[in-house]
Image (cartoon, rainbow, N blue to C red):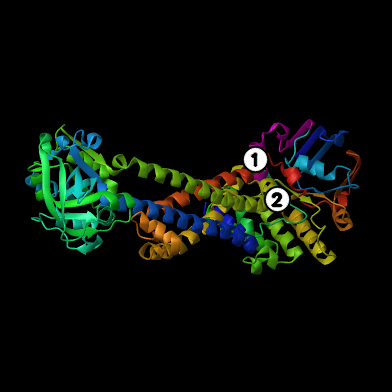
Amino acid sequence: MITYIKLAWRNLWRNKKRTFISAASVFFAVILSLIMRSMQKGYYDYMIDSSVRLYTGHIQVHGKDFWEKRSLEESMYYDEALIQRLKENKNIFEIIPRLETYSLISFGKVSKVVQVNGISPEVENNITRLKEKIVEGSYLEDNSEGILIAEGLSKLIGVDIGDSVVLYGQGLHGITAAAVVPVIGIVKFAIPDQNKSFTYLSLRYSQELFSAYDRITSLSILLNDADKIESTKSSLKNYFDDSHEIMDWAELSPELVQSIQIDNASGIIMLGILYVVIAFGIFGTIVMMTAERIKEFGILISIGMKKRKLALVTTLETIFVSFIGVAAGALISIPILLYLEKHPIPLTGETADAILAWGFDPIIPFAFYPGMYFAQMWTVLAIAFVSALYPINFIRKLKPSTALRG
Amino acid sequence: MKLIELTEVSKIYDETIVPVRAVDNVNLQIDKGEFTAIVGPSGSGKTTLLNLIGGLDKPTAGKIFVDGTDISTYKEDELINFRLHHIGFVFQAYNLIPVFTAKENVEFIMLLQNISRDEREKRAIDFLDAVGLKDRINNFPTELSGGQQQRVAVARALASTPSFVLADEPTANLDSVSAESLLDLMEELNFKHNMTFIFSTHDEKVIRRAHRIIQLRDGKIEKDITSKSNYPINS
């Protein structure tokens, strides 16, 4: 076997320029496809991470029908001791309790329906960095009895810090929930819908206002390792009975999953085009190497080399040239991708503004994970094997007496 | 001793519009130790006849016996195996594996025969020594002259310990000095080791040294001349 490997390896270098060009075509295609995949994966990870941090969490636990009805009647009991037990799970990074409902807000002659989010101020800020979005006034504390209003909403109803608004809504079991609440802070959101309708109260105060004592509407759970989402979900089932529903981010944000799937499909088409380039690069080399060695093949078969051994040599040649390109591409891409992962490409101008408007940082993020290397290697090797079928078939049909004529 | 026997062998190429009868009903016997040249004008069927004897092609009709075995019925893999163990080939050019050294080229055929590494190495050096190239064993073909390359080819042909050597125009690409030197070597191997050589050639130098000349025309044996005086003494 060593001799056949040696023969194949040396054959490769009979025409250094050709081998170099073939390997280079694989090299550049691998680098390009790796960067492309890294960018796509980075973007998806960033989107998912932003989405889960901003709102849903990786996993959310809520009352069985809450997700559909969005009613306080579907709220759940907030058990602090249970939260502490859940936190013993090493994959759980943070648990964010929220009480979400809708209410009428009035100031002067203007009224509007708003979403009221009862939050645990410190925990919420750790995850969503809500405090950083304060543009005026101050942030909530656990015992605050004031309200944070989104900047767009404050303009709509003409309210400012120090003013008091009237909240008038329906609490648990239909009890009227009404209060005059001072505005203590104004928060600015990039997403227009949020900026026109979000308000925040401390969890304790919102429970009191809506007569939902010791109750919450959801527990958003952030994980350390999002890849273990299924196992964590399963383990959570041991703590919650059938009156609860445990959903992951993909179930909570199907539109995000769909947009990723669509984008991924276009990425795969682009990758496919790159692979076609690789395939032609390799195949061109193989056809040339085969065509110029017909007489040599004839001689080898004549002196007694079995066709399958000759086919093995040509296959090894194909694998080698592909592997040189793949290995070089993979090695060179490691520092590039590691750098890009740590230093995402910043966006400027209108593109940046548009991205900011959706509440995301104006960057092109990159991901680095070993899996994409394996996928590349296997794909290129698969192309090499398919390309190797050409000389194998050629040799199979070769008649030594004809081949000897060249 | 009868080594090769062709009985009413024909080879017809019918891929063309008009079928070509390259070898036409040939009967031929070649004995062990012969130094035979198959000659004739271009298109007379020399190479086809050599290919049939060497198991590189199958006859359309007739039988070919080598060492008493009918090889005309062999399947492709059997023929490859037969060639590996029974026939040494020396071709006109592009004879050697260009990426292997002289020694590796000679060793390669023994590798195909599954001979152990130590044995291969020893025999390769011995055969290269026998063809006068002991000091060039680590040279690649491109570092050798045409004559030296053909000597390596002879060493490779002999390394497989064949029943006979088929040489297709072995001197065609050589200058006269190298050609004579190669023929000296082959003649010596024939003389000392009773190795059978069958040439297909146009070259006067080969024809002059051959002990038997089989002249072909239009696929038929036109003349079969034997010069007994040239036969090796131990034949």
**Residue at 49% in and 61% down:** A328
In the current view of this chain or complex, which residue is farthest to the front?
Answer: A109
Q: Quarter of the image holding residue B30?
A: top right
Q: Quarter of the image holding residue A190?
A: bottom left
Query: Which marked residue is nearer to the observer: mark 2 or mark 1?
Result: 2
For badge 1, the amino acid type reads: Arg
Residue range (magenta): B60-84
* In-front residue for pair B152/A154: A154
Element assignment for label 1: helix
Residue A222 in the image, given as x and y percentages of width and height: 22, 50
Q: Is residue B71 magenta?
A: yes
A80 left or right of A291 in image? left
Residue B177 in the image, given as x and y percentages of width and height: 82, 66
**Residue at 24% in and 42% down:** A231
Near mark 1 (Cα within 10 A), the count class, few <14, some 14-19 or many ≥20, is few
* In-front residue for pair A345/B171: A345
